[in-house]
Image (tube, coloured by chain):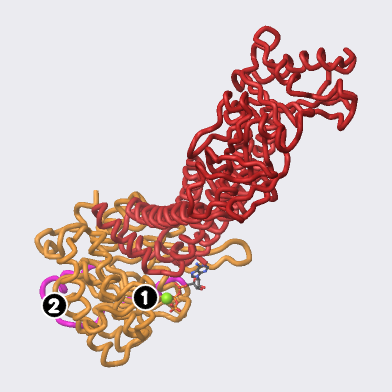
Chain colours: A orange, B red
Amino acid sequence: MIGPMMNGPEDRSTRPGHPPVLDVRGLTKVYGEGEATVHALRGVDLVVERGDYVAIMGSSGSGKSTLMNIVGCLDVPTTGRYLLDGVDVSRLNDRQLALVRNRLIGFVFQAFNLIPRTTALANVELPLAYAGVPAAERRRRALAALDMVGLAARAGHEPNQLSGGQQQRVAVARALVTEPALVLADEPTGNLDSRSTADLLAIFDELNAAGRTIVLITHEPEVGSRARRLIKLFDGQIAADVRQGGPARGSAADRMLDQPTVPMERIR
Amino acid sequence: MSLFEILRFAARGVTANKLRSALTTLGVLIGVGAVILLVAVGNGSAKQITDRIAALGTDTLTVQSTSRGGASNTAITVETAKALRDPVLAPDVKSVSPVVSASATITYQGSDHSVQQFVGTYPSYFGASNTPVGTGAAFSDEDVAQGRRVLVIGQTVAEELFPGVEPVGAEVTVGGSLFTVVGVLEEKSSSSGFQDANDVAVAPLTAVQQTLTGYGPVSSVVVEATGSDRVDEAQAQVAAILDQRLKVSATTSGAANRSNSSPYRIQNASQLLETQTETADTFTVLLGAVAGISLLVGGIGITNIMLVTVTERTREIGIRKALGAPRRVILTQFLAEATMLSLTGGGLGVAAALIGSQFTIVGVKPVVVPSSIVLALGVSVAIGLFFGSVPASRAAGLRPIDALRYE
Ligand SMILES: Nc1ncnc2c1ncn2[C@@H]1O[C@H](COP(=O)(O)OP(=O)(O)OP(=O)(O)O)[C@@H](O)[C@H]1O
Ligand SMILES: [Mg+2]
């Protein structure tokens, strides 16, 4: 059932008419009841094609993380439909959802969510372990991922022995170690200095150039400007959806231009 | 993910938070250890009581005269005792040993020892009163008939008078007469605190009458029944003969051994044993209840620790689910963790209880009851497993984001 999603991103150009990675229609999310009701999302439509690089911006509390959690199969919408690679996520059972989270999606949490009292290396190895990768291979790939974010020297440290920025980079390494086709990052540069931010964005550019789909949330305009597409969220609705420069891509980028986009610039 | 891999995760989970693991283990340890040890103490004290009574002999009756220095026709004499040995009237009586006792001082080569109980009786006394001869030999009926001055001494007497010397064959002086030690009794478990059961000397009845007590009434008669299940019959037969010989009126004979007007009293060791065993059983039940409570308290302790960690573990489960762990893998890991902790704690608890039972506790040598080990271990491990895995199973059923937000 989730077979098509397991295909590598390389298949993208060879399969015309392939469904978009993300296809979200009329998504709403309501928290709480009665007096305390919060409408975190008020009808979001969003289509993201394979190989796209999307940045989501918006003020605090505008529903960015809520949207990201639903897209990452960690939460369910109150109403609305969500197709991931053409598959209705609400129909997947626990085992299939686990497979999707493990193989298809790499998720970077806003709050890092590293497992306490467990070394950075073991944290990064975790998704590989659940994927059934043998121990030696796991270790090698986890160390490579940590090296990629510049933390190879901190592999043996536990989360409480790492700075906020270092924890964030461990979280990024953990999301990327499985080489997922879809990277979802909730403020991955929130705790990083400009230098580390630049390094991380270079990694994302590289991943995107290799055909992976990236959706990230940010508050920093310079991070947002690196993406091919910038979405502005306001009060649980998409207020703007702008296609912008970003790194040059070949035919895939051209194909992306004629994808449907939601109405531009919402009146404030 | 292979089972081995999951078990490694569980082992890592157990070692990751040492304090929590140690507390959980300790909770199980105390629960299991307390139950086993308390039951062992209860059982040990019950056994101690039974042993004490068994040492008296369970198939014997002791006939004593209640009229002190009264009319001679109601006194129990050697003749009365001999009359109890009657195959027709008393078929359930195996042996009869009249006993005279006195306190006497035994002197050996200048050192003397005041023996608590100097007993004159028949050789059957040794079997009936459950006091077998250890080294040397008992005296014989022949010795009694001849009034030979031979002596069998208890362990305490042997230690006091013959430190490092072989007592058998030695000549001692008792009340001015010379006795030859022919045997030493086996060590007897000391019954009551102030009376040393080993501070005795036993000699032929005739010899003691000659040298110490004179030929008056005997102090008591030890009657041995043909079996411990024939004691009641033997008692009735003995009572009938005594009533007849001592001319007790029919109205009082029914309750002969209780009535004040009766000139004799019959003590039945098996009756004593029964009441004492009942007491001991009550004691065991009481301690069992205490043990049950401690098991409950230990269980609540385990539950508490397990529940306190749920918040942290639920967040962890949320992370694991977000990274792609299926429910089954998470459940297996947490069940394995709970099993490791409970079994380690339970094993250590059993070990602690077994070590503890080697020592004497409040004057009682504990005797471990195997079923208490099974029960304590079973209950504690079950509690550990239940409270270790149920919150985990609940958390594993949550959506990752809800598990991550759990507070
Ligand atoms: N579990 C929840 N229960 C109730 N309300 C919630 C819950 N999670 C989020 N909200 C509310 O939903 C709204 C959107 O929250 P969300 O976390 O998506 O914001 P955000 O855009 O990510 O903000 P930030 O930039 O600060 O991370 C907020 O008003 C928040 O208070
Ligand atoms: Mg957020």
N-terminal-most mark, 2 or 1: 1
Return the mark for residue A112: 1
Residue drawn at x 87%, y 24% as measured from the top left: B72
Q: CA distance from mark 2 to mark 1?
A: 31 Å
What amino acid is at disc 1?
A: Phe
Relative image position of residue B203 (x, y in whole percent): 62, 35
Relative image position of residue B347 (x, y in whole percent): 42, 53
What amino acid is at disc 2?
A: Arg
Can residue B197 be found in the magenta stretch?
no
Residue drawn at x 32%, y 91% as measured from the top left: A193
> Viewer-proximal residue, B245 or A212?
B245
Residue B397 seen by the camera: no
Marked residue chain, label 1: A
Which span of residues is magenta-colored? A236-259
**Left-right relation of B128 to B341:** right
The residue positioned farthest toward the left in the image shown: A14
Return the mark for residue A249: 2
